């Protein structure tokens, strides 16, 4: 049994994983109860796919793979060499600079991890089959499957639950993509880590939206990551100023985490996404340019990256919010075009941004749009924006 486990660990490392630990295929009873409670409390509202039946399945490995005996838990760091070039921990939580760029969370600085992780996990299973000269029953998951990835990583000893709900590994911090292979191989489980956040509360104190409502509990409806990515509708008006210049995800509760200061790089990193960052630095995208992109241009620039998940309309909505927060008058022409565009969601947020910028030019654009607009929700945004400009 020891040899088999050593083979799994060696092959996982050869396939490019930084972390590999094993847990049993027993049900995740406590995590199931906690997840069901979060659903019942409404903390997962807005994620319609996150249902009670999904949680039931995802916490019962034997339901996902009949005959399951072990879960191989894997971690792959996405901390890139030279990440200090990007927004620094010290700048986290400060107001946006007037440079009309928006920030992208670090995990999207590399190519879409789902593909890379799944390919490496498939390679690992094939390598084990070759080593063992027999078929290995296996199913593998990243965070888009039903498996509770953090619960599995925690029980296997990959890391402990941080108060920001991320898994923290002593070497790689929380900059880690997690994967799980459920298998019929009988492997000796590893023990959970005997570590915790102790008295630290940095992530809770520094979250700009108060989304970490209690240690280990993130209210999705307040989290910038949810609001800018999975959320398909409007960003609630009271949340928009708090979103600052984030246009895809948010790293603040990870940037301020002391464990992440010592994070190591991946052994075999995922290649960086070819995103053509702005001169201001890696992780920044020109907002006016983003706002004016056609669907073809958007696909051309972001294909193969995690940013595709938010879709063009979502990203343009986010760009409007960031421009409003930057109060950058030079963005008025781009916002005026957006206000005349085809998407009511983008038009509404463009109106909000113009209201935040204020001044004669912005008011003129809003007043013209009020004459032509037919969508009730957008008209309401325009009228509120005009009121804000007049008041401001
Ligand atoms: Fe708060 Fe940002 Fe962390 Fe969400 S990702 S909990 S908004 S700091
Ligand atoms: Fe834990 Fe502190 Fe990191 Fe939050 S900032 S996850 S409390 S160590």
Image (spheres, rainbow, N blue to C red):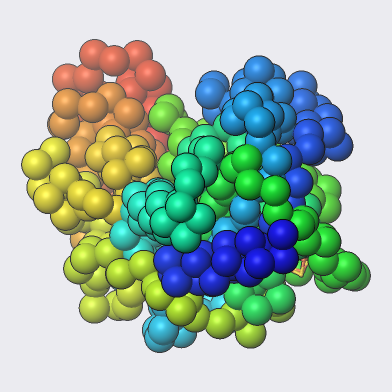
Residue at image position (38%, 19%) is 377
Q: Residue furthest front?
A: 133
Name the image quarter holding residue 66: top right
Residue 97 drawn above or below residue 294: below
Q: Is residue 67 left or right of residue 275?
A: right
Residue at image position (85%, 69%) is 195
Q: Position of residue 94 (x, y in %)?
A: 55, 70
Residue 276 drawn above or below residue 86: above
Q: Is residue 330 left or right of residue 385?
A: left
Indicate the quadrant of ligand 2 in the picture. Answer: bottom right
Name the image quarter holding residue 390: top left
Q: Position of residue 118 (x, y in %)?
A: 41, 49
Q: Position of residue 173 (x, y in %)?
A: 64, 72
Q: Is residue 19 left or right of residue 339?
A: right
Residue at image position (27%, 64%) is 273
Pick the residue in front: 21 or 8: 8
Pick the residue in front: 261 or 91: 261
Callout count: 0
Pick the residue in front: 186 or 179: 186
Q: Confirm whether residue 351 shows in the render.
A: no
Residue 297 drawn above or below residue 5: above
Q: Position of residue 115 (x, y in %)?
A: 34, 50
Pick the residue in front: 137 or 245: 137
Q: Is residue 107 left or right of residue 328?
A: right
Residue at image position (75%, 46%) is 24
* Quarter of the N terminus within the rendering: bottom right
Q: Confirm whether residue 125 shows in the render.
A: yes
Name the image quarter holding residue 189: bottom right
């Amino acid at each position: 049994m020891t040899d088999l486990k050593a083979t799994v660990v060696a092959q996982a490392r050869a396939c490019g994983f930084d972390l590999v630990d094993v847990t049993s295929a027993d049900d995740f009873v406590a995590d199931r109860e906690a997840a069901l409670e979060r659903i019942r409390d409404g903390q997962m509202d807005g994620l319609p796919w996150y249902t009670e039946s999904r949680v039931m399945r995802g916490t019962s490995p034997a339901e996902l793979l009949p005959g399951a005996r072990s879960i191989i838990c894997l971690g792959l760091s996405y901390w890139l060499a030279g990440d200090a070039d990007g927004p620094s921990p010290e700048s986290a939580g400060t107001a946006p600079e007037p440079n009309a760029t928006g920030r992208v969370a670090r995990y999207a600085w590399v190519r879409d991890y789902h593909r890379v992780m799944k390919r490496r996990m498939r390679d690992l299973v094939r390598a084990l089959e070759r080593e063992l000269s027999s078929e290995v029953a296996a199913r593998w998951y990243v965070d888009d499957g039903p498996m509770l990835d953090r619960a599995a990583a925690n029980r296997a000893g990959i890391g402990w639950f941080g108060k920001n709900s991320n898994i923290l590994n002593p070497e790689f911090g929380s900059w880690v993509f997690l994967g799980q292979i459920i298998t019929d191989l009988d492997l000796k489980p590893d023990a959970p880590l005997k570590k915790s956040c102790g008295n630290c509360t940095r992530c809770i104190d520094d979250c700009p939206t108060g989304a970490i409502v209690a240690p280990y509990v993130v209210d999705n409806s307040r989290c910038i990551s949810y609001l800018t990515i999975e959320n398909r509708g409007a960003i609630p008006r009271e949340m928009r100023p708090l979103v600052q210049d984030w246009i895809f995800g948010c790293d603040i509760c990870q940037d301020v985490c002391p464990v992440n200061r010592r994070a190591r790089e991946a052994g075999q990193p995922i290649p960086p996404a070819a995103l053509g960052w702005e001169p201001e630095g890696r992780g920044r995208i020109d907002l006016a340019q983003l706002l004016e992109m056609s669907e073809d241009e958007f696909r051309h620039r972001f294909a193969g990256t995690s940013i595709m998940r938010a879709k063009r309309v979502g990203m343009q909505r986010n760009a409007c919010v960031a421009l409003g927060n930057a109060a950058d008058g030079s963005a008025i022409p781009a916002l005026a075009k957006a206000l005349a565009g085809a998407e009511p969601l983008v038009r509404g947020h463009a109106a909000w941004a113009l209201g935040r910028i204020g001044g004669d030019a912005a008011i003129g654009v809003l007043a013209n749009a009020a004459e032509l607009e037919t969508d009730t929700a957008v008209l309401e945004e325009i009228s509120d924006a005009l009121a804000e400009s007049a008041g401001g």
